[in-house]
Image (cartoon, rainbow, N blue to C red):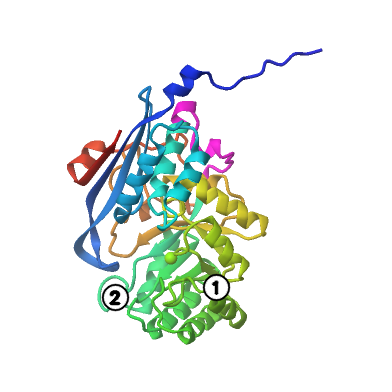
C-alpha cells in the first residue's frame, strides 16, 4: 500500500503571519492630454484620480493594486477595517463580510480590496493570479474603445470614427467600439454606425455604446436598427434608463437583431443575475473594479457560463487580463478610452512595461497577461505619493 503524505491545515504560527495588519489607501491625480469631458480633444489636458492600495500582513508581505473609483474611498476604507486581522488568504470570507457590511451601498469600494488580496496571495505563493484562477491563456484579444464624439476634436464626424477605426485596424485591432455623441441626439450616431459598417464591417467586430445618452426607448430602437443594418457585434447601454430596466431591454431585444450588452451599471452577482434571468441582456457585463473584485468577477463569469452566455469585462487593467485568462466564455478586452488625439486613460504608474496604451497592441490585436507573481506588475510609488490628494491608513 502506497502512503501519500498529506498536507494538513496551516499551523498557528503560519496563520498569525498571514493576518492582515495594515491597509493603506491613496488617491492620486494624473494628467490626460488629448481629452476634455470625455470628448477627444487634441492638446487639452484634464486630470483623472484613481486609488492605490497596499494590504500588508503581520510578516511584512504585501499585495497592491492601482484602480477603482476615486469616489469610493469611503467604502474602500470601511472594507479595509473589515478585513483587518483576517487571514490574508481568506478572500471568500472577506467577500462575504464586505457584502453584508456594504449592503446599503453599491459596493464599488470592495474591488480594490479584493484585487490587492489576490496580488498578496499570488506573491506569497509565487504564482500569477491567472495561474491561481486556473487560467490557460497568455494573451487577450482587444477592442479599441473610443472617447466620446464632439462638435470639434478628433471624433467630430461619422467619417472621423471610420477613419480612426481604419487606423486601429492597421495597428492590429480586429474589434472597435464607438462611444458616440453624448448630447442626446441620435442622427450622428446612426450615421457613424452605418459608416463604420461600410468602411470596416466584415473586417472588425463593431460595437456601439451610448453610455445611456439617448433620451427615449424610441431612440434606442432607431439606433439599434442601424446596428442591425451594419452588422454590429453588440449594442450597449443605449438609453437613459441608466442601463437598468430589464423589461424595456427585453422588449428592445424583440425589436432588433443586434445582441444587447447591459450590466455595466448593475452592481454585483445577484443583481446581474436578476437582470439576465429577466432577459434584459444578451452579453453579461462584469468589472473587477466595480463588482467586488476578481472574486466577484469570476462568480459572475461562472454564472454566465452556467447559462451558456458570454461575459464581457468592462475597461482595461491587469486584474481584468488575469480574469480573462481564466474565462472561456468571453470575447474581447476593452482597451478604453482611445481616440485620434492620443489621450491615455490609464495611470502612468507602471515600472514593469505594462501598458494599456493604444499603440502598444501586438500586431495580432492582443495584449499579454502578466506572468509574474500576483498581478505581475510593479508600481511607481514615488509618482503615486508625489501626486497624492488623500491618504488613509487602517492598522
Ligand atoms: Mg459602457
Q: Quadrant of residue 378?
A: top left
Where are the magenta residues, as a range? 122-139
- Circle on res. 246: 1
Percent position (x, y) of residue 371?
Answer: 47, 35
Residue drawn 40% across the image and 41% down it: 82
Q: Nearer the viewer, residue 348 or 25?
A: 25
Q: Nearer the viewer, residue 114 or 44?
A: 114
Q: Secondary structure at mark 2?
A: loop
- Circle on res. 150: 2
- Circle on res. 346: none
In front of the other: label 1 or label 2?
A: 1
Pointer 2 local density, CA inside 10 Å: few below 14, some 14–19, many at least 20: many
Looking at the rendered image, the quarter that the C terminus falls into is top left
In this view of the protein, can residue 373 be seen by the observer? no
Percent position (x, y) of residue 145?
Answer: 41, 63
Query: In the picture shown, does residue 329 fall above or below 179?
Result: above
Q: Specify the quarter for ligand 1.
A: bottom left
Magenta region includes residue 284: no
Cα distance between the residues tagged 1 and 2: 30 Å
Q: Quadrant of residue 149?
A: bottom left
Amino acid at each position: 500500500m502506497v502512503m501519500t503524505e498529506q498536507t494538513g491545515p496551516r499551523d498557528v504560527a503560519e496563520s498569525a503571519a498571514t493576518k492582515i495588519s495594515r491597509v493603506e489607501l491613496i488617491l492620486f491625480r494624473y494628467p490626460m492630454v488629448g481629452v476634455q469631458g470625455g470628448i477627444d480633444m487634441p492638446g487639452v489636458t484634464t486630470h483623472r484620480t484613481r486609488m492605490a492600495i497596499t494590504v500588508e500582513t503581520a510578516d511584512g508581505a504585501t499585495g497592491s493594486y492601482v484602480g477603482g473609483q476615486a469616489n469610493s474611498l469611503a467604502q474602500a476604507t470601511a472594507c479595509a477595517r473589515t478585513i483587518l486581522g483576517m487571514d490574508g488568504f481568506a478572500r471568500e470570507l472577506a467577500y462575504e463580510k464586505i457584502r453584508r457590511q456594504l449592503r446599503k451601498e453599491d459596493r464599488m469600494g470592495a474591488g480594490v480590496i479584493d484585487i490587492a488580496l489576490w496580488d498578496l496571495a499570488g506573491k506569497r505563493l509565487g504564482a500569477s493570479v491567472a495561474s491561481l484562477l486556473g487560467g490557460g491563456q497568455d494573451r487577450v484579444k482587444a477592442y479599441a474603445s473610443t472617447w466620446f464624439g464632439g462638435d470639434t476634436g478628433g471624433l467630430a464626424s461619422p467619417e472621423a470614427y471610420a477613419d480612426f477605426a481604419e487606423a486601429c485596424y492597421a495597428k492590429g485591432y480586429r474589434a472597435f467600439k464607438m462611444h458616440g455623441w453624448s448630447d442626446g441626439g441620435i442622427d450622428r450616431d446612426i450615421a457613424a454606425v452605418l459608416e463604420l459598417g461600410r468602411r470596416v464591417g466584415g473586417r472588425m467586430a463593431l460595437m456601439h455604446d451610448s453610455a445611456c445618452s439617448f433620451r427615449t426607448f424610441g431612440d434606442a430602437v432607431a439606433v439599434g436598427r442601424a446596428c442591425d443594418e451594419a452588422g454590429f457585434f453588440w449594442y450597449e447601454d443605449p438609453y437613459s434608463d441608466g442601463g437598468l430596466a430589464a423589461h424595456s431591454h427585453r422588449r428592445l431585444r424583440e425589436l432588433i437583431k443586434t445582441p444587447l450588452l447591459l450590466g455595466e451599471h448593475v452592481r454585483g452577482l445577484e443583481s446581474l443575475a436578476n437582470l439576465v434571468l429577466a432577459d434584459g441582456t444578451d452579453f453579461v457585463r462584469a468589472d473587477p473594479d466595480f463588482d467586488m473584485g476578481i472574486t466577484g468577477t469570476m462568480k459572475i463569469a461562472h454564472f454566465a457560463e452556467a447559462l451558456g452566455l458570454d461575459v464581457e469585462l468592462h475597461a482595461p487593467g491587469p486584474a481584468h487580463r488575469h480574469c480573462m485568462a481564466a474565462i472561456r466564455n468571453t470575447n474581447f478586452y476593452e482597451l478604453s478610452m482611445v481616440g485620434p488625439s492620443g489621450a491615455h486613460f490609464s495611470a502612468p504608474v507602471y515600472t514593469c512595461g505594462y501598458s494599456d496604451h493604444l499603440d502598444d497592441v501586438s500586431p495580432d490585436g492582443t495584449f499579454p497577461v502578466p506572468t509574474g507573481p500576483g498581478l505581475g506588475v510593479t508600481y511607481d510609488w514615488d509618482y503615486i505619493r508625489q501626486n497624492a490628494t488623500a491618504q488613509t491608513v487602517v492598522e
